[in-house]
Image: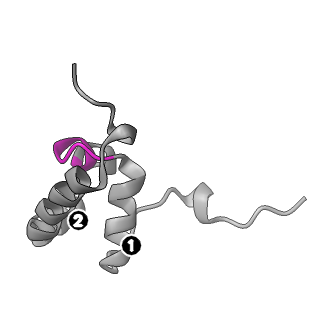
Amino acid sequence: MEVPRYRRKAAEMRQVFERIDRDRTEIIVQYKAGDALGYLAQQYDVDRHRMKRFLIDWDVPLRTRASATRKHHP
């Protein structure tokens, strides 16, 4: 039985993160070409929020829905 993602040890995650860092340019190109965040995260078996953090750390402008960036006034 496979270990759930949230139960993996730091050493196991380090290998995944190093692989993501090696494929950094490829990931950025795929994201800018229109691939979904969840799809990219699934390829590397990480949470989509974790993949989002990588993109933010790499200064990649994220695609957001208009409603997500609009100010909400009561």
Residue shown at 90%/58% (left/top)?
A: 74
Foreground residue, 50 or 35? 50
In the rendered structure, which segment of residues is drawn in magenta? 40-46
Quadrant in the rendering for residue 58? bottom left
Answer few, some or many: residues within 10 Å of disc 2's Cα (few below 14, many 20 plus, some between 14 and 19).
some
Circle nearer the N terminus (2, 1): 2
Q: Is residue 43 above or below residue 11?
A: above
Q: Is residue 32 above or below residue 46?
A: below
Q: Is residue 43 magenta?
A: yes
**Residue topped by disc 1:** 56
List x then y, in percent, for residue 6.
39, 40
**Residue topped by disc 2:** 32
Horizontal relation, residue 42 to residue 24: left or right:
right
Residue shown at 29%/47% (left/top)?
A: 46
Per the model, the C-alpha gap separating discs 2 and 1 is: 13 Å
Q: Is residue 57 magenta?
A: no
Foreground residue, 21 or 15? 15
Label 1 amino acid?
Ile
Tell me the quarter of the image containing the N terminus.
top left
List x then y, in percent, for residue 28.
19, 68
Kind of element beneath mark 1: helix
Horizontal relation, residue 67 to residue 23: left or right:
right
List x then y, in percent, for residue 30.
16, 59
Foreground residue, 12 or 32? 12
Label 2 amino acid?
Lys
